[in-house]
Amino acid sequence: MSDERRGYLYGLTAYVMWGFFPIYFKLLRPSPPLEILAHRVVWSVVFVALLLTGMRNWRFLARILHTPRLLGGVSLAALLIAVNWATYIYGVNSSRVVETALGYFITPLLVVLLGVTVMRERLRPLQGVAVGIGVLAVVILTVDYGRLPYIALTLAASFGCYGLIKKRMSLPPAEGLFVESAVLLLPALAFLTWLNLSGGAEFGHVSGLHTVLMLVAGVLTAIPLLLFAGAANRVPMVGLGILQYVAPILQLGVGVLIYHEPMPPARLAGFGLVWLALLVFTVDGLRSARAAARDRAAVVEPVLQAGGS
């Protein structure tokens, strides 16, 4: 198997795992979202610490601790991913799986807006069309829901900003996940201690299966992130861009087909506009990638001809 094919396999596996996460989080009820989040943080730290110990790779900590910019960036990234995780768990366990899928569908469009507003990137015409269609879709869905789809917008905003910060820091995935989880560890432990002392904890009091599922939260958090990192190093950006739609498509299927969440005509029309926006966005990405490849070839070919003359 070629390195690129292995990358596609890693990426597809990661996105399929994320796509079926709603089923996993549904199994963690009756634990409330904050208890699930706290356990996810704690067991992520434990699992990734064991992984890094096996890899004998702890030198990165000194660099982060002695670089205020990195430490501040990691802390902000930790806060954003905590908001994202908590919102996702709340959305799934309040029977809004379809709305969580919407959040990850519109994330690429919001990332484009972040690129324009924060990174001062130029908006290509088709990107502008895609963003405009996406905004219209959100307006239609707002009318359908009778409110802003705040779960979807919070998921898209938190994950988009998280990705922007991660891109600027360029930390390896395992090391980055460990530090982000470690930043959240003390608040998570304090919350779990309070929850146990107040008698509100569900962990260890529901069933053996529930306890085991809570314990493996760290493993299920880390594995798809590590697989995605393996894919990112092997797969072209256009390929990754197409793969990212696998998870929300599966989440939408889980919400509609397994949990029978409603999909009235107006909501379906809103989703249809989102998919149209993503189609325009993907076509633009493919055209841009081909144009860049032609430009590189135009530069390299004369150099090769000169070298062979």
Image (cartoon, rainbow, N blue to C red):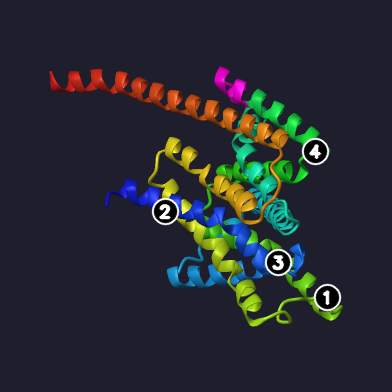
Q: Position of residue 176 (x, y in %)?
A: 56, 56
Q: Which residue is mark 2?
A: 10
Q: Inspect the image, locate mark 3, and give the three-letter code of the amino acid beneath it.
A: Ile
Q: Inspect the image, locate mark 1, and give the three-letter code of the amino acid beneath it.
A: Gly
Q: Which residue is mark 1?
A: 200
Q: Are marks 2 and 1 in contact (CB under 8 Å)?
A: no
Residue 172 makes an appearance in the image = no
Q: Earlier in the sequence, mark 3 or mark 4?
A: 3
Q: Are marks 4 and 2 in contact (CB under 8 Å)?
A: no
Q: Earlier in the sequence, mark 4 or mark 1?
A: 4
Provide the secondary structure element on which disc 3 rests: helix
Residue sitting farthest toward the right:
198
Residue 17 lies, with reference to residue 239, above or below; the image says below
Q: Earlier in the sequence, mark 2 or mark 1?
A: 2
Q: Inspect the image, locate mark 4, and give the three-letter code of the amino acid beneath it.
A: Leu
Magenta highlight on residue 153? no
Q: Which residue is mark 4?
A: 148
Tell me how far mark 4 sits from mark 1, CA to CA.
31 Å
Tell me how far mark 3 sits from mark 2, CA to CA.
26 Å
Provide the secondary structure element on which disc 1 rests: loop
Tell me how far mark 4 sits from mark 2, CA to CA.
35 Å
Q: Which residue is mark 3?
A: 36
For image coordinates 52% across by 43% down, the residue present is: 244
Q: Earlier in the sequence, mark 4 or mark 2?
A: 2
